[in-house]
């Protein structure tokens, strides 16, 4: 996928639809937006926008929470 895209080039039409489909399937299989951005040579914002346009339900951020630790 990344080989067919020239960095900074505008992605339109069928190429954009194909890219959106590829990003959607990889994201839904567990890859992060940052990993997809690096793989395609695009920005985080571009990948995020493509996923949103594709109707993907984006995952939460994860990581540490800021609340008090619950005791068992």
Image (cartoon, helix red, strand yellow):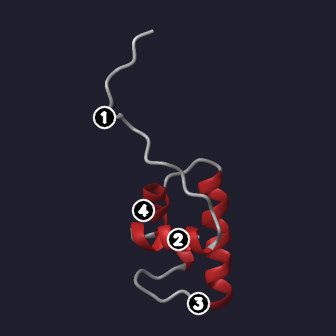
Mark before the other along the chain sequence, 4 or 3: 3
Residue on which the image places disc 1: 66
Mark before the other along the chain sequence, 1 or 3: 3
The local secondary structure at tag 2 comes to helix
Q: Are marks 3 and 2 in contact (CB under 8 Å)?
A: no
In the image, what residue occupies the spot 64% across and 84% down?
15
The local secondary structure at tag 4 comes to helix
Depth order, front residue of 52/30: 52
In the image, what residue occupies the spot 41% across and 71% down?
45
Depicted 35 relative to depicted 41: above or below: above
Residue on which the image places disc 4: 38
In the image, what residue occupies the spot 60% across and 65% down?
23
> Can I make out residue 42 in this image?
no
Residue on which the image places disc 2: 2
Percent x, y of residue 44: 40, 66
Q: CA distance from mark 4 to mark 2?
A: 9 Å
Camera-near label (4 vs 3) is 3
Percent x, y of residue 62: 44, 41
């Amino acid at each position: 996928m990344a080989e067919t895209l020239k960095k900074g080039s505008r992605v339109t039409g069928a190429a954009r639809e194909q890219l959106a489909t590829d990003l959607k399937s990889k994201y839904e299989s567990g890859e992060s937006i940052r990993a997809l951005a690096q793989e395609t040579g695009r920005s985080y914002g571009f990948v995020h926008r493509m996923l949103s346009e594709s109707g993907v339900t984006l995952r939460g951020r994860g990581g540490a929470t800021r609340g008090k630790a619950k005791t068992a």
